[in-house]
Image (cartoon, helix red, strand yellow):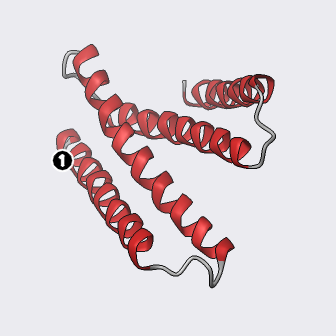
Amino acid sequence: MSKTLKIRIYIITLIIIFITSIISALLLFFYMNIESNIKVSYATMWTATFLSISSFLTLIIFFFKNIYYRWDIYIRNLSSSLRQWVLMTSFILWNIVFMATWVFSYKTSLLLFFVIFFIELIFQSMWD
């Protein structure tokens, strides 16, 4: 398979994940009875939100990398974009969880950022 075909399949998969997760989040928001089981409703909404944000931001950072590398892009660039935005989305969602549980402070947010930053550095050192 050629390089561009692999990247196109990857991008189409991310677009499908984005569209289906947005649709499922909207359907859950409008049609699910939250009072019946709060834990399940929060878990499914967080999962749908996580998938939609991370897949959308992966496509955005991929296109920025595309411009930066002057259209000479490889599948590992797309994989690194996905990994970076999954980590960033988890950082954002964990800060929201910290705010909802009243344990948010700038120190916990900064600590979480450094943990995720060092995890990304570990992944980059393993790939290079």
Locate residue 106: give its quadrant: top right
In the rendered view, does 102 fall on the left or right side of 16? right
In the rendered view, does 61 fall on the left or right side of 51? left
Determine the residue positioned at 34% across, 60% down: 22
Please say if 115 is above or below 3.
above
**Three-letter residue code for mark 1:** Leu
| SS assignment at label 1 | helix
Q: Which residue sits furthest front? A: 35
Determine the residue positioned at 80% across, 23% down: 107
Judging depth in this view, the residue of 12 and 89 nearest the camera is 89
Looking at the rendering, in which quadrant would you find the C terminus? top right
Locate residue 76: give its quadrant: top left
In the rendered view, does 104 fall on the left or right side of 45? right
Residue 42 image position (x, y, % from top left): 60, 66
Residue 126 image position (x, y, % from top left): 62, 30
Residue under circle 1?
5
Local packing at callout 1 (Cα closer than 10 Å; few below 14, some 14-19, many 20+) is few
Please say if 60 is above or below 66.
below
